[in-house]
Image (cartoon, grey):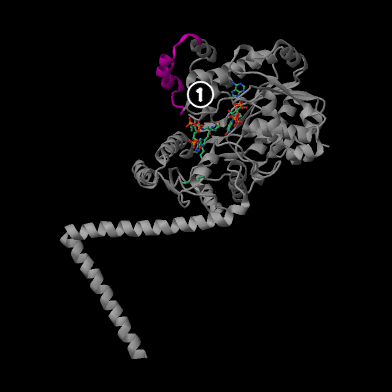
């Protein structure tokens, strides 16, 4: 019997960010392994014209929840969606709901965050810092609370090369930042943002670091732990391999490369690709919840959920495997044939951006215009290049994260728990994982049918022929122009033609003699 699964039975669990990538997998695993848990409260906001109930219904009817529904058909009865907006004061939760949450919750998993790299500081502080502070305040009023697990990111301190399992202070106290957001206007905030984030690349990593400081300040009153995952990718094993439902991290780039939009990227092939499957993060998070509640460590423990020091893979190897998988399972209706070139300097990056990205987009838009359609490729390409410029920081550096606490926790688990809540990334076979990841992107993100593979192959063959035809025509045009203008080009041309003629004459003569 799994001790962790047994621990969650009968418990009331509060999850923020349950509609997000990680939150969904967390909820699924909890319900699948501990079907006897009392209730899962999820804080959800109405969004995109959908009510709370519609959002929950959609999640529970998705492919991700198929397995859990097999042996727990009444899974929806275990979930209690509470209307809440983490951007609002007191999260805009109704009095009755708040009362229930405060009096019943045993464990809190705080996953909600804005993960956008381009968010303005005000919004990023509101969600990643102020909301964390408010949730901690709520938690301190929960008499039955056993553990509060905060999900941070391994990149909160990405301005350092070696990162230990400690909370590093930021230069300005989070309380001062929160206060200043109340009275500073947007223009001033934009002006001071680069100074505040310092050598971090974006407001996301900065506000996640501030969020950790807030957690630390409350750690005397509460039983808290922090989980810091690195780049979270598709599922490795559970509930099935390759599940993914958003474009964050590598998923968007896999699509862009598979559809032939992205053919070159400024990335360091030898840099460590610290990817971690989402089910591994969830298993560790649930194990941390159990350990924190049962063992009540004296200080706030931080757990790095990373792969680089235990089972490293680099971007070069990952890129090659992604390409190899495109050969087996091509994506449908590609713009160009998938190809990957990793460049490491500014000049080649600009060159390939012009030649491989912008020029084909302009030519395609010209073709769309000629055929009476609306041009769209240049706009799409500009957005893609902007996205890539924001990810470049992370694919041209390597970090080292110490993992003593994570390894300690692994050794504390029973053999059964090590199996059911496996977070030992040493067992991960990268080539197999990446192949399943690409397949998952095709199936669950692009919603492409495997039956369409022969047609996709046929389409790629057509693209190859167009490519050859285009290159030959381009070569002939350039050559013709050169011959017309340069004596030297004419001489080279006559030399090549006479050489070919002599070679053919010799070949014909020798075959006549043999006959
Ligand atoms: C050469 C060949 C290569 C071959 C092989 C290739 C595979 C192997 C190599 C793999 C290298 C992996 C590197 C990962 C590094 C991750 C580091 C994370 C570290 C921190 C981890 C964390 O602790 S935290 C979670 C991470 N947090 C994000 O990862 C959010 C990012 N994101 C945004 O901050 C917003 O997304 C942003 C971008 C502002 C746009 O914002 P935006 O306003 O333009 O609007 P949207 O977000 O709605 O997206 C609008 C359009 O961008 C497209 N798109 C969105 N994301 C995309 C994406 N990742 N890749 C592509 N395309 C993406 C989308 O397809 C839309 O396209 P469309 O226009 O057609 O709709
Ligand atoms: N994905 C990754 O690569 C990594 C993620 N992390 C951390 O993991 C956690 C989860 O990330 P992930 O699942 O990928 O992120 P997602 O963007 O997929 O999910 C974010 C969640 O937060 C919720 N949320 C955002 N704003 C509000 C709001 N105002 N009120 C209520 N809920 C809100 C979203 O709800 P809604 O659906 O309504 O928008 C969603 O459920 C985050 O703390 C992130 O920092 C750490 C390392 C890497």
Q: Is residue 253 left or right of residue 351?
A: right
The quarter of the picture where residue 482 lies is bottom left
Instruction: Tell me which residue sits at (67%, 38%) in the image.
Output: 279
Of 484 and 201, which appears nearest the observer?
484
| For residue 407, side relative to residue 105 (left or right) | left
Q: Is residue 24 visible?
A: yes
Residue 262, position as x, y percentages in the image: 45, 45
Give the magenta range. 182-201
Q: Position of residue 92 (x, y in %)?
A: 64, 13
Q: Nearer the viewer, residue 166 or 506?
A: 506
In the image, residue 452 lies at what x, y percent? 59, 53
Q: For residue 109, which quarter of the picture?
A: top right
Would you say 137 lies left or right of 335 here?
right
Q: Residues within 10 Å of mark 1 (few under 14, many from 20)?
A: many
Residue sitting at the far top: 183
Name the spot of residue 118 as percent of width and height, x first.
Answer: 47, 27
Q: Can residue 284 be seen from the camera position used here? A: no
At x 32%, y 58%, the residue is 473
Q: Which residue is mark 1?
A: 206
Majority secondary structure of the magenta segment?
Answer: helix
Q: Secondary structure at mark 1?
A: helix
Based on the picture, tell me whether residue 16 belongs to the magenta stretch: no
Which residue sits at x=81%, y=32%? 74
Q: Quadrant of residue 4?
A: top right
The quadrant of the picture occupied by the C terminus is bottom left
**Is the residue marked 1 within 8 Å of ligand 1, measured from its CB?**
no
- Residue lying at the far front of the rendered structure: 372
Q: Quadrant of the N terminus?
A: top right
**Relative to the observer, which residue lies in front, 285 or 496?**
496
Is residue 193 magenta-colored? yes
Up the image or down, 355 lies above or below 131; here it is below
């Amino acid at each position: 019997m799994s001790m962790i699964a047994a621990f969650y039975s009968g418990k009331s669990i509060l999850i923020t960010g349950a509609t997000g990538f990680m939150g969904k997998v967390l909820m699924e695993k909890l319900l699948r392994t501990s079907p006897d848990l009392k209730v899962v409260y999820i804080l959800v906001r109405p969004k995109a014209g959908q009510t709370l109930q519609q959002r929950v219904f959609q999640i529970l009817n998705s492919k991700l929840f198929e397995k859990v529904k097999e042996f727990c058909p009444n899974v929806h009865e275990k979930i209690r969606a509470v209307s809440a907006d983490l951007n609002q004061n007191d999260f805009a939760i109704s009095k009755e709901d708040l009362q229930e949450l405060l009096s019943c919750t045993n464990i809190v998993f705080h996953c909600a965050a804005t993960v956008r790299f381009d968010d303005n500081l005000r919004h990023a502080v509101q969600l990643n810092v102020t909301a964390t502070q408010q949730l901690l305040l709520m938690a301190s009023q929960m008499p039955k609370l056993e553990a509060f697990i905060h999900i941070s990111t391994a990149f909160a301190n990405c301005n350092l090369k070696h990162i230990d399992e400690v909370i590093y202070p930021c230069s300005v106290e989070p309380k001062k930042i929160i206060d200043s957001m109340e009275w500073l206007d947007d223009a001033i905030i934009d002006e001071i943002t680069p100074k505040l984030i310092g050598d971090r690349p974006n407001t996301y990593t900065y506000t996640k670091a501030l969020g950790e400081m807030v957690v630390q300040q409350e750690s005397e009153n509460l039983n808290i732990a922090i989980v810091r995952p690195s780049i979270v990718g598709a599922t490795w094993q559970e509930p099935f391999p390759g599940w993914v439902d958003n474009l964050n991290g590598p998923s968007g780039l896999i699509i862009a490369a598979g559809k032939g939009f992205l053919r070159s990227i400024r990335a360091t092939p030898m840099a460590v690709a610290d990817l971690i499957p989402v089910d591994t993060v969830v298993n560790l998070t649930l194990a941390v919840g159990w350990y924190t509640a049962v063992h009540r460590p004296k200080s706030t423990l931080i757990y790095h959920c990373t792969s680089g020091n235990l089972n490293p893979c680099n971007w070069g190897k990952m890129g090659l495997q992604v390409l190899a998988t495109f050969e087996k399972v091509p994506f449908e209706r590609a713009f160009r044939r998938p190809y990957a070139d990793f460049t490491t300097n500014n000049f080649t990056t600009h060159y390939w951006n012009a030649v491989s990205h912008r020029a084909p987009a302009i030519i395609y838009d010209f073709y769309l215009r000629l055929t009476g359609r609306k041009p769209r490729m240049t706009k799409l390409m500009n957005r893609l290049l902007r996205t890539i410029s924001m990810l470049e920081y992370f694919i041209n550096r390597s970090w080292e994260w110490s993992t003593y606490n994570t390894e300690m926790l692994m050794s504390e688990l029973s053999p059964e728990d090590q199996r059911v809540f496996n977070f030992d990334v040493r067992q991960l076979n990268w080539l197999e994982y990446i192949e399943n990841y690409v397949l998952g992107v095709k199936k669950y993100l692009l919603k492409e049918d495997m039956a369409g593979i022969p047609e996709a192959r046929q389409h790629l063959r057509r693209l190859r022929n167009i490519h050859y035809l285009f290159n030959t025509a381009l070569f002939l045009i350039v050559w013709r122009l050169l011959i017309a203008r340069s004596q030297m080009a004419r001489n080279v041309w006559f030399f090549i033609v006479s050489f070919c003629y002599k070679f053919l004459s010799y070949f014909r003569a020798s075959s006549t003699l043999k006959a």
